[in-house]
Image (tube, grey):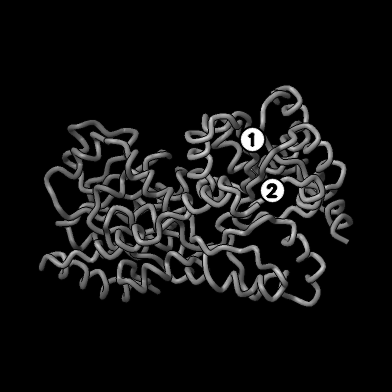
């Protein structure tokens, strides 16, 4: 049944590729993957294979990749992606020796891929469970690990109709999961090679903090104030909440890094900011940015460093598809606001529990809670410390995984 579904999916992708650029890139990348490997693989090298669906999963695997790169240079790294949104951003990532797409999970693709690369170890990040690849890896005796995975009762593995597919989980040498519930659920399937280590994203954001960029234009923008509100990955429903509030609090400067950087969206933001002195980052000079009270980040790659300049942060997406990366803000020791669609984000629940994160359902609740945050700041009560301590207290998953895998504790 699984292979039948894969064949139908393959047909659907080929059809969609005729009309969608993103799907076309994925399809072409998958078709070229074996040729890329045949060209680049060193037949005398030992490869460790990391697979991430997209960019977010890559960031979870990155601390492991870079640790192995540094501590075990005898191995080469193969990094594969499923989604163009991961591959296109990280196709030149220097931490891996080869970066390519992973061909669709058919028996023939899996055999050709594994015959070409012959990995000595494989890591699948979070939700990646590729049935044919996994079974062939197990048949060949290759240690395979699931990292930062998390399981919930509503997943297919725990339904009566998904029990056969759940056998894919038994192919893992060990699963390194985020929480105790995941371990308990896996035990109901007879899977006990499980270790609760947490989420490697905590390690990653600490690394990002250490490597944060100095941004002279942003420093000039914030030089004359201690009241800076940073909104990251914001969408229009988010901006319609925090911008009107801050328009009335002119002693607070705003840095807005929208999730979508298109002229239509930027025009909507500018309309909301009517009457404010606004400058776009790509058009700013030291003179104009110093005179502005709103800075719009109209380029990518700066957000994780920009949070350092704020006293309060807002992470967007919570009124739509789901909140974006709250940990990138929390690691800088600032209270973090976000919308209501956060229930499946364990880190958001943790931040709320420790009073470092504030969920809001609309403009009125934002006003009440933002008023309270401003009052707390004015009285020296730094709520952001709770956010930073939450991140720090959950770090260390990467070291636990490396120790287990390379000291033969999980093999």
In the rendered image, residue 90, in percent from the top left (x then y), is placed at: 55, 36
Give the residue pinned by disc 1: 78
- The answer to whether 42 appears left or right of 393 in the picture is right
In the rendered image, residue 361, in percent from the top left (x then y), is placed at: 40, 74
- The answer to whether 330 appears left or right of 290 in the picture is right
Mark 1, other Cα within 10 Å: few <14 / some 14–19 / many ≥20: many
Cα–Cα span, label 2 and label 1? 15 Å
In this rendering, the answer to whether 298 lies above or below 352 is above
Quarter where residue 235 is shown: bottom left
In the rendered image, residue 232, in percent from the top left (x then y), is placed at: 38, 52
In this rendering, the answer to whether 348 lies above or below 126 is below
Q: Is residue 17 among the parts visible in the rendering?
A: yes
In the rendered image, residue 394, in percent from the top left (x then y), is placed at: 40, 60
Residue visible at 80% across and 52% down in the picture: 135
Give the residue pinned by disc 2: 143
Residue visible at 59% across and 60% down in the picture: 149
- What's the mark number on residue 120? none
Q: Is residue 275 among the parts visible in the rendering?
A: no
Residue visible at 53% across and 72% down in the picture: 180
Q: Nearer the viewer, residue 309 or 265?
A: 309
In this rendering, the answer to whether 380 lies above or below 408 is below
């Amino acid at each position: 049944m699984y292979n039948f579904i894969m064949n139908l999916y393959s047909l659907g992708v080929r059809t969609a590729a005729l009309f969608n650029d993103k799907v076309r890139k994925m399809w072409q990348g998958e078709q070229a993957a074996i040729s890329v490997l045949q060209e680049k693989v060193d037949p005398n090298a030992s490869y460790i294979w990391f697979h991430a669906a997209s960019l977010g999963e890559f960031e979870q695997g990155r601390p492991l990749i870079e640790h192995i790169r540094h501590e075990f240079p005898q191995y080469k790294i193969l990094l594969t992606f499923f989604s163009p949104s991961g591959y296109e951003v990280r196709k030149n990532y220097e931490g891996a020796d080869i970066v390519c797409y992973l061909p669709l999970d058919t028996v023939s693709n899996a055999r050709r891929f594994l015959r070409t690369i012959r990995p000595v170890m494989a890591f699948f990040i979070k939700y990646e469970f590729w049935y044919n690849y996994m079974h062939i890896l197990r048949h060949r005796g290759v240690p395979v690990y699931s990292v930062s995975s998390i399981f919930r009762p509503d997943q297919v593995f725990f339904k009566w109709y998904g029990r056969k597919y759940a056998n894919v989980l038994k192919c893992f040498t060990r699963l390194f999961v985020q929480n105790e519930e995941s371990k308990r659920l896996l035990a109901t399937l007879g899977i006990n090679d499980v270790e609760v280590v947490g989420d490697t994203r905590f390690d990653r954001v600490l690394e990002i903090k250490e490597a944060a960029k100095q941004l002279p234009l942003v420093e000039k923008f914030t030089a004359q104030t201690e009241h800076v509100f940073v909104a990251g990955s914001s969408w229009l429903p988010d901006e319609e909440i925090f911008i009107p509030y801050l328009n009335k609090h002119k002693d607070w400067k705003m840095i807005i890094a929208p999730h979508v950087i298109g002229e239509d969206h930027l025009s909507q933001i500018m309309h909301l900011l009517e009457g404010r002195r606004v400058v776009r980052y790509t058009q700013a000079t030291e003179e104009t940015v110093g005179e502005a009270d709103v800075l719009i980040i109209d380029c990518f790659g700066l957000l994780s460093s920009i949070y350092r300049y704020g006293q309060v942060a807002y992470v967007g997406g919570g009124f739509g598809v789901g909140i974006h990366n709250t940990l990138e803000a929390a690691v800088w020791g600032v209270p973090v606001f976000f919308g209501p669609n956060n229930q499946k984000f364990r880190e958001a629940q943790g931040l709320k529990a420790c009073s470092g994160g504030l969920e809001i359902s609309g403009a009125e609740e934002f006003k009440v809670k933002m008023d309270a945050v401003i009052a707390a700041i004015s009285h020296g009560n730094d709520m952001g410390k709770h956010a930073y301590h939450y991140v720090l207290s959950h770090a260390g998953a990467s070291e636990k995984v490396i120790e287990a895998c390379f000291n033969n504790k999980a093999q």
